[in-house]
């Protein structure tokens, strides 16, 4: 089973730390579908050091989410260490993760995220400074390289291990690829064979079968699921069950999907306020609606929603419509 430092997971399935998505409401919902570990969205080291109100709110963790990994990012050693120490002493996170994979320019311009991929020496310096300053296990999430000409995944992973990192999550894409193209699983296998700490594979795991294939082909210790879980926490449950039993569980009904969507909405409202939560939930609702026949009209209406009741009514009306059409087909 996957173990990071002294933190033992119930299984090998990990929720990726997706920015703008992985707040407590989403994480808890996914956790209840069986994820062995959930990861919080990345938080700015400077935001923590300066006690920015929005940043402080991002550090909230519900005890039911644990074990949980909280991810920080930064380009300067002093503020990164200070932020890690704050997380270590003032949050109930189990693991401190350092972002070394975010490809967006506003992050890399600050010498943070994927910019580290170009310099194994900096990786060693930064990770070792954090490891020395905290008690919680320190991990790193990284990409395989900056571009096709600068793939230092093995050297970078070895630098993390030498620095005292307890695990690595490796996304098999370069920074230049962003989220396009195909993830390279061969590099995950190569890195796994070059280090002794746990390696979690990430990239193109879209089905439970993909997860098993990644584990089998690369030898990695865990599998990280990101976009495939958006609006679809059943992907987590089905993957856990498939890895455990070899049986592929069925897809949820439209009613089941919308019930969880509404639960997610209510948790988001409790976390934020109704106005902010409903606007943020619009994108999640679109993800929950994916694959539901005739969802375009409902999606368009949800994008105009400003209240919980309006959104819930739209979702329930759509379920009633789908169920009525299904019953007519059955009768016919």
Image (tube, helix red, strand yellow):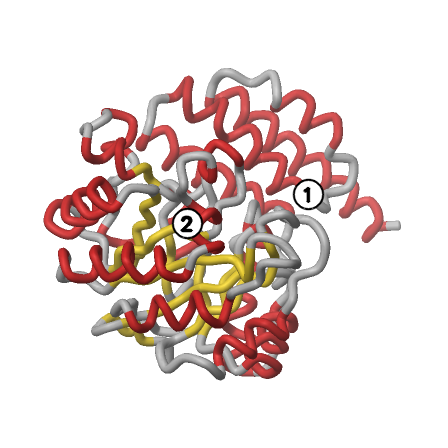
Q: Is residue 123 left or right of residue 228?
A: left
Residue 113 location (% of width, % of height): 43, 46
- Residue lying furthest right in this view? 332
Q: How far from the left and from the top, in percent, is residue 136?
A: 18, 61
* Residue designated by label 1: 290
Q: What residue did someone put label 2 on?
A: 29
**Residue 20 visible at all:** no
Q: CA distance from mark 1 to mark 2?
A: 18 Å
Q: Nearer the viewer, residue 44 or 62?
A: 44
Q: Position of residue 172 (x, y in %)?
A: 59, 63
What's the residue at 56%, 28% (across, down)?
282
Residue furthest left in the image = 89
Q: Quadrant of the N terminus?
A: bottom left
**Is disc 1 surrounded by few (<14), some (14 to 19) or many (20+) residues within 10 Å?**
some
Q: Which of the two residues, 270 or 149, is positioned nearer the viewer here?
A: 149
Question: Toward which corner of the image does residue 75 lie, by quadrant?
Answer: top left
Q: Are marks 1 and 2 in contact (CB under 8 Å)?
A: no
Q: Residue at x 15, y 61 (%)?
A: 132
Q: Position of residue 246 (x, y in %)?
A: 59, 82
Quarter location, residue 110: top left
Q: Is residue 111 above or below residue 205?
A: above
Q: Compared to 101, does 6 lie above or below?
A: below
Within 10 Å of disc 2 (Cα), the crowding (few <14, some 14-19, many 20+) is some
Numbered mark located on residue 89 in the image: none
In-front residue for pair 260/130: 130
Does the image show residue 155?
Answer: yes
Question: Could you tell me which secondary element the residue under label 1 belongs to?
Answer: loop
Q: Secondary structure at mark 2?
A: helix
At x 34%, y 22%, the residue is: 273
Question: On the rendered structure, is 211 left or right of 3?
Answer: right
**Rendered residue at 56%/47% (across/down):** 230
Mark 1 vs mark 2: which is more N-terminal?
A: 2
């Amino acid at each position: 089973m996957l173990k990071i430092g002294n933190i033992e997971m119930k299984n090998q399935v990990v929720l990726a730390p997706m920015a703008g998505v992985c707040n407590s409401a989403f994480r808890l919902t996914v956790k209840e579908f069986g994820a062995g570990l959930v990861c919080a969205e990345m938080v700015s080291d400077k935001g923590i050091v300066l006690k920015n109100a929005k940043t402080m709110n991002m550090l909230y963790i519900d005890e039911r989410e644990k074990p949980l990994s909280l991810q920080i990012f930064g380009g300067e050693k002093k503020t990164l260490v200070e932020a890690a120490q704050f997380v270590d002493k003032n949050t109930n996170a189990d693991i401190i993760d350092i972002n070394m994979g975010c490809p967006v320019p506003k992050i890399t311009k600050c010498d943070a995220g994927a910019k580290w991929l170009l310099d194994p020496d900096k990786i060693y310096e930064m990770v070792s400074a954090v490891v020395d300053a905290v008690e919680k296990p320190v991990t790193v999430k990284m990409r395989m390289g900056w571009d096709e000409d600068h793939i230092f995944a093995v050297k970078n992973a070895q630098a993390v291990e030498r620095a005292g990192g307890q695990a690595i999550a490796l996304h098999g894409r370069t920074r230049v690829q962003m989220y396009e193209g195909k993830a390279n699983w061969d590099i995950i296998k190569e890195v796994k064979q070059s280090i002794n700490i746990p390696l979690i594979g990430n990239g193109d795991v879209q089905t439970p079968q993909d997860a098993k294939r990644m584990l089998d082909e690369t030898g990695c210790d865990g599998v990280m699921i990101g976009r495939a879980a958006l609006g679809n926490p059943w992907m987590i449950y089905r993957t856990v069950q498939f890895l455990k039993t070899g049986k592929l569980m069925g897809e949820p009904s439209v009613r089941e999907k919308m019930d969880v969507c509404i639960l997610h909405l209510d948790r988001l409202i409790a976390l934020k306020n109704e106005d902010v939560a409903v606007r943020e939930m619009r994108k999640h609702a679109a993800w929950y609606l994916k694959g539901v026949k005739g969802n375009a009209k409902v999606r368009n209406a949800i994008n105009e929603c400003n209240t919980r009741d309006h959104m819930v009514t739209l979702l329930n009306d759509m379920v009633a419509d789908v169920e009525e059409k299904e019953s007519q087909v059955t009768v016919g």
